[in-house]
Amino acid sequence: MTADYADQLKNLDATMRNIESVLDIARLRRDKERLEEAASAPDLWDDQAKAQEVTSRLAYATGEINRLTKLRGRIDDVAVLMELAEAENDASSMAEVGTELVSLAKAVEELEVRTLLSGEYDSREALVAIRAGAGGVDAADFAEMLLRMYLRWAERHGYQTEVYDTSYAEEAGLKSATFAVKAPYAYGTLSVESGTHRLVRISPFDNQGRRQTSFAGVEVLPVVEQTDHIDIPENEMKVDVYRSSGPGGQSVNTTDSAVRITHIPTGIVVTCQNEKSQLQNKASALRVLQARLLERKRQEERAKMEGLKTDAAGSWGDQMRSYVLHPYQMVKDLRTEFETGNPSAVFDGEIDSFVEAGIRWRKQNELEAAA
């Protein structure tokens, strides 16, 4: 048993060293020092957008360093405990070593997933759009459940989010919602969530208690940066202003602060109504439009390389995950085959296992395509 534990520890240590090398903990520490200096500047909040970027990146760097150092400390501690248990022939301490090795293996595996995010835009922040699909009021309710799921996931990780637009359905739920996850690698992490999600349950909106299947689409885009050069001439945009709808504060339904931008050449329409001022909503809507145009450009370039014809809606894909609440309880990813029997936890934001399985699945497909 001791030899087996020693082999497990040796493998964990080697994997951890590789992770530390790929994630470059020395660079993270340098970034943290630089960002701490920037965050302490007295004029930081004169530019709110820059301040939010600095604080977001500082929180990310601090979190990553803490995560790496804590895991390295646990590996070193279990090595010491194993030596003591072996020297003193302490069976209970050796059993504790075994338990900790199992826990460490899971933690190291989760961290290893981050090293698989090497795509062109993977390090970006993410824009997430959710739209109700077929299924009427149940689909609108499902879209709202998914919005809460992703916001809870971000909250669990300490990631800042900003909701740009929520379009409420008449009876319940949402027609659509768009929000940003302001954390490095949010796009690379959440991009595997793009696709059609399906919910099966006894409808709470059906007075006969019948089972209902409903659908919602999730689209994940990388946030546009200045280096992307997505310039949109004013004459290619139609900007409409209107009064916000749905629940909100004093500014809702009282002023024409909501903004809708239509990109005339492509027909892409984006809206933003969650800020108090028209200027803020226009700026947010423009960022979303730029992200959609960047994604469209990227897909067109990919299609040209592959000699295929595609369109901007292709990223929605076919059904990728089923959430079944009746006649049994299960959430299953149809691509990776990963599943759990606890839908309540999933809807409360516990989706890391699905995300990690999706990232590994995508990487495996990329390797097979390259081969």
Image: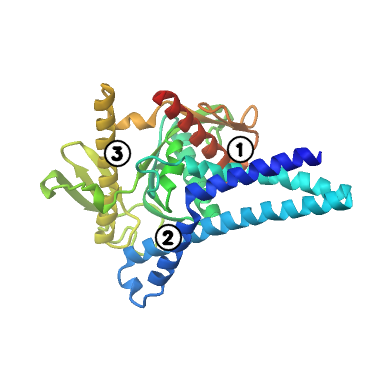
Quarter of the image that includes the N terminus:
top right
Spatial CA distance of label 3 from label 1 is 31 Å
| Residue 286 on image: x %, y % | 25, 51
Mark 2 vs mark 1: give the one in front: 2
- Please identify the quarter of the rendering in which residue 118 is found: top left
Amino acid type, residue under disc 3 in the picture: Glu
Q: Earlier in the sequence, mark 3 or mark 2?
A: 2
User: How far across and down, in percent of the image, does residue 89 sit?
Assistant: 89, 49
Which residue type does callout 2 highlight? Ser
Query: How far from the left and from the top, in percent, is residue 281?
Result: 28, 56
The residue at which mark 1 appears reads as 343
Taking the spot 78% from the left edge, 50% from the top edge, the residue there is 82
Q: Which mark is residue 56?
A: 2
Q: Is residue 109 visible?
A: yes
Q: Position of residue 17 (x, y in %)?
A: 57, 48
Q: Which residue is mark 3?
A: 295
Task: Report the residue that reaches farthest toward the left.
Answer: 235
Q: Name the secondary structure under disc 1.
A: helix
- In terms of secondary structure, where does tag 3 sit? helix
- Residue 171 visible here: no
Relative to 46, 206 lies left or right: right
